[in-house]
Amino acid sequence: MGISSALAISRPPFLPSISCPLASPLRFKRTLLVSLRCWCGPSPKLNSDSETSDKSFSLGMSKSSWCAALGAVGFLETAYLTYLKLSNSEAFCAIGGGGCNDVLNSEYSYVFGVPLPLVGMVSYGLVTLLSVQQSGKNLIPGIGEIDVRFLLLGITTSMATASAYFLYLLGTKLPGTSCSYCLISVFISFSLLFITLKDYALEELQKFVGLQLAIAAIVVATLSNSYTITSPKLPGSSDMILEPYETEITEQSTTWTIALAKHLHSIGAKMYGAFWCSHCVEQKQMFGREAAKILDYIECFPEGVGKGRKMAQECTLTGLEGFPTWIIKGKVLSGQQNLQALADASEFVSQDSSYQLASKQNQS
């Protein structure tokens, strides 16, 4: 049997349809593999490589995994702060001393009456849920990949804008106050925005710049409006009137708090507040019953709150942004202050060191 006859017998019937012909009988197996590649089209390895480059972001984790992880950390942090806010508990703050509690108890810890940590917890929860959805887990039926990307862009833009606004408040309205939880939240919010933006090409981002600026403007306007001093809304009819009342101060004053109150009175320091303000009552409780009577306290709603009742003119002219507000030697201290902060602002010096010693022991 000749060579040509042997090749004719051994040649598989499907080879004539392959576009890559056999070169010689000795290269049959190798040519068959090459022919199959030509027949099947592009190698699947190319698609696999492209998917890997799309999913990998840093340290072997995808963008959605990073967003989900950061969102979970932010959720846990704000959940802890929400618990502290609702239970009126003290925050553990290893860095910054009592600054965390000062911020948590300030008038800026609410947005339209809703605790700010609760708003943050909901926002971080949404980011985590959407990021898990983006990773391939169908947790929210009916939401596609494009919808998830668009929602993440809007939410992270809002969160970063709000974080920048609160960072501004921390530096201008609460100067000298440090809050590690605030800084952590700012870092997480901007990291989430950065990772989300990395998911878009430059051409895509140019289409959404106007939308992002509009979202940022709405967030700033909403937060600014929420911190504008207005009369508290009463439940029920708008014709209702809340008559002024006094809350009894039950704590007993110490020698140190009485001396501090006398010093604040002597230098003309004033405390502006409202009878319905719980933080104002807590501020007086810190001084105690005897010392609170010595303070120059200005009631901003002496006629009550409701229809036809207005804020006192002195409070209006002062331009208060919340209650309580201290004005000491031209300095404006917004929100409930710890006694040592008031002593430092008023340059109070006392021979009685019992309060400072007790404060150091509590911090340690």
Image (spheres, rainbow, N blue to C red):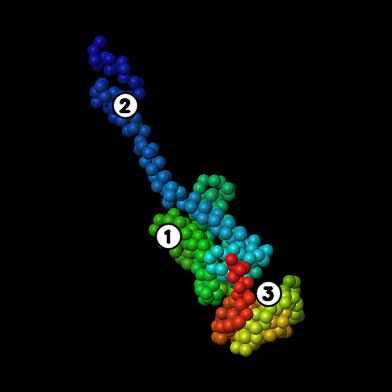
Mark nearer the viewer, 2 or 3: 3
Q: Secondary structure at mark 2?
A: helix
Q: Position of residue 13 (x, y in %)?
A: 35, 21
Q: Quadrant of the N terminus?
A: top left
Rounded to the nearest whole Å, what is the CA distance between mark 2 and mark 3?
87 Å
Instruction: Please determine whether, in this image, residue 53 is positioned above or below residue 22.
Output: below
N-terminal of the two: label 3 or label 1?
A: 1
Rounded to the nearest whole Å, what is the CA distance between mark 3 and mark 1?
49 Å
Q: Position of residue 230 (x, y in %)?
A: 64, 77
Tag 2–tag 1 contact (CB < 8 Å)? no
Indicate left or right for 107 with 22 as reference.
right
- 30 or 245: nearer the eye? 245
Indicate left or right for 11 with 168 as reference.
left
Can you identify the residue that label 1 sits on? 205
Q: Secondary structure at mark 1?
A: helix
Badge 2 amino acid: Leu
The residue sitting at 28% across, 17% down in the picture is 7
Rounded to the nearest whole Å, what is the CA distance between mark 2 and mark 1?
48 Å
Mark nearer the viewer, 3 or 1: 3
> Badge 1, how many Cα within 10 Å: few under 14, some, many 20+?
some
Q: Secondary structure at mark 3?
A: helix
Tag 2–tag 3 contact (CB < 8 Å)? no
Rendering quarter of residue 358: bottom right
Q: Position of residue 44 (x, y in %)?
A: 39, 38
- 100 or 225: nearer the eye? 100
N-terminal of the two: label 2 or label 3?
A: 2
Can you identify the residue that label 2 sits on? 32
The residue sitting at 72% across, 77% down in the picture is 252
Instruction: Please determine whether, in this image, residue 158 is positioned above or below residue 327.
Output: above
Can you identify the residue that label 3 sits on? 282
Badge 3 amino acid: Glu
The residue sitting at 47% across, 59% down in the picture is 191
